[in-house]
Structures are given as C-alpha cells and as structure tokens.
Image (tube, helix red, strand yellow):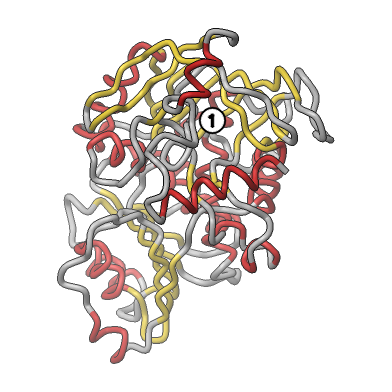
Amino acid sequence: MAYLADFKILEEKKLGLSTPGKFGLLQGGRQKSDARRRKDMRAAVLRTPYNLKVEEVPRPEVKPGYVLVNVKSTAICGTDVGIYKGKIAASLPRILGHESTGEVVEVGPEVTGLKPGDRVVLNSVIFCRHCPYCYTGQVNLCEHGGLMGREVDGTFADYVAVPDFNAIKIPDCISYEDGTSLIALATVVRSQSRIKITPGETVAVLGQGAAGLLQTRLAVLAGADPVFAITRSQWKLDIAARFGAQTINARDVDPVAAVKEATGGRGVDIVIESVGSSATLRQAMEMVRPGGTVVFFGIAPASLDDFYGYAMYYKELTLIGSRGMTPRDFELAIKVVESGKIDLAPLISHRFDLSQVTEALELVDKNPGEVLRVVVNI
C-alpha cells in the first residue's frame, strides 16, 4: 500500500536520511514539477516559527488507498500553537492544522466504504497498521506514527489527502464546526476508558478548557457524583454547571481545600488534570484520596518542576497518562453526541477564516482564558 512508503520516509527522516518537508507538498523535485500539472490550493504554511502565511501550493495527489477531502472547518489546539511558536518540534516547512472536518471529493483506487459527498471527521493520528502496537489496536502508540500538521501536512488548507481509514463518516446532525470537537472528545473518551469511572465515585477535573469541559460532562454521564469542575474562569464554570458539575472557582478559593472540605477531608477518588502544569499536577496529587487515581491528561511538552513524588509513595497513588485516540474512541464519541447527551455547540467561542489563521493562533496563545474552541472555516 502507498502509505507504507510514506512511513518509510518518516523513518528515514528520524535517522537523518531525508530532508524536512519531503513527506508533504512543499519540497522535492517531483512535487515541484508536478505542480504545473495539478491544480493549486490555499494553505497556511509555517516556514519558520511565527512565520505563517497563506500560500498557493499544489493540491495533493490521491494515491491508492487515499481520499481527497475538501476541508470545511479546522479547530486550533495547543499543539498547533506550540508548533507555531517553535516549542513543539516539527519538520518545516509544514502546513499546520489537524482537528478537522470536511467532505470527500475524490477517492483513490482500493478505497472501500467512502464515496464523494461523504461528510467526515479526520483522525489526525498517523499509524501504520503493521507494528506490534497497531496489531493490538493501540494505534495511538504506533512505532511509526505521528500527527497531521506536524510530521505530515495538515488541514489549514482547501484540501488534504488522507488514508481512507483516517476519514470517519459523521451524521448530518453534527455540523462541520461542531464536528471538529469530536477529535477532542475522542481523546477524552480514550483517557476515561483507562480509568473506567464507577457510578458514585467522586471526580475532580482541573482545568475547564474545551477538553476539560468534555471530561467533566463525560464523568457526569459515567455516573460520578459529585463531579467538581475547577478553573479560574467563571464563564467556563457556568458551562460546567450546565453540564452537571459542582463548580469551584480557583481564583476565589484554594481548590485543594475546597475539594477536601466537600468530601469530608477525604479527597476525591479520581482527579483528571487537564491543564498540563506543575502547579495543577501537584494540586491533583494533593486533592485525591489515598489510594486514588490521577489522570495526567493535560499536554506538557516541557519538563515539570516541583513534581510531588512523595505523594506517590505516601498515598499509594496511581498516575495514568493518556495519548491521542483510536478509531474506536471516535465511534463512541460520535455515538454519544448523536444521542444528544453531549452538546458540542457551547464549546465554540470564536470563528475565523483561513486568511485570519495567524490572528486565530495569536488569540489562543495570548488569551487562553477568553477562548474555548477557536475554529477556522476554510
């Protein structure tokens, strides 16, 4: 299959045997010569940190096993901001973006199950389907894997070509904008599948960004009672309250003391840390009960200072990490949204056009307390 050659290029790149950008559209003699024979498209190309411009680039080829998707909406997440600022490594130049929905407009040979006109959400996790992890269903841990918009070109573009198994059909009841949040929800489903909340357990969710709010809502649906939603932003706490949580404003009170008081001094059974900082991880380990579980869901590309390791010993804590999602997590995410139990619409706080993508990234970077999901409509 064609995607195996793509992963060979990724492996060569890791060994220093190929030049940055060779996987995608932006470098290489063949791509340049083919550009004259193929239609162009708009794409937001990052050439160096902070140097992001919308350019005309060749539309991607549709290889065997691939589909061409007309991108409709792409949401911005922290990884996009990190790549834009140079804090998360990526091979440049690179078309950014990975949390996307769109319409299939062309299918390559050997594609089954998809046709032009299908509405899809894109699984942004790259996986080979042939390594030991993929064979056991852990495609999020693929030995040869990566992420769209980081290792391969992404979705701040008119079109993207992806393997057919990375395009997942969505029902008409989920809009293209709302569908971008299915990626975040799938990661939440993945993380909560690793802890399996029991009805009646107590849960605290530190951080109420879009993913944190989805953690809160899914914990409520799992039967946790109470679920404490913790953040400094009152407007986000108002959404969490509508999602069924008890709220704690960390700007007004010490969240550890508030959780301890609400649980009779015991602490909660499970804490889901959704910020990714040393301070909030320590708070999580302090507010969880002895023998409890802390889910380290927040992404922290830098090392964590002041790690509260003694609590691991003294309280016999379980610390669980969670990375990405699997196709099964997408299926469950779509099902719960289709059922009406989770409303994704309140999560979108800002909308931009592709020409404003730099402005959108700067907003997320500089004003995180003012945003939830920032969507770029293509």
Q: Residue at x 57, y 55 (%)?
A: 189
The vertical placement of 14 against 29, above or below, is below
Q: Quadrant of residue 221?
A: bottom right
Going by the picture, which residue comes out furthest to the bottom?
A: 314
SS category of the residue bearing label 1: strand
The vertical placement of 217 against 29, above or below, is below
Residue situated in front as seen by the camera: 63 or 12:
12
Residue situated in front as seen by the camera: 217 or 3:
3
Q: What x and y, as percent, mark residue 152?
A: 48, 37
306 with respect to 247 (left or right): left
Residue situated in front as seen by the camera: 34 or 245:
34
Q: Residue at x 80, y 34 (%)?
A: 111
The vertical placement of 245 against 159, above or below, is below
Q: Is residue 165 visible?
A: yes
Q: What x and y, as percent, mark residue 341?
A: 64, 43
Q: Residue at x 23, y 24 (%)?
A: 51
Q: Amino acid type of disc 1?
A: Ser
297 with respect to 340 (left or right): left
Residue to which mark 1 is pinned: 100
- Mark 1 burial class by Cα count in 10 Å: few <14, some 14-19, many 20+: many
Quadrant including the N terminus: top right
Residue situated in front as seen by the camera: 295 or 54:
54
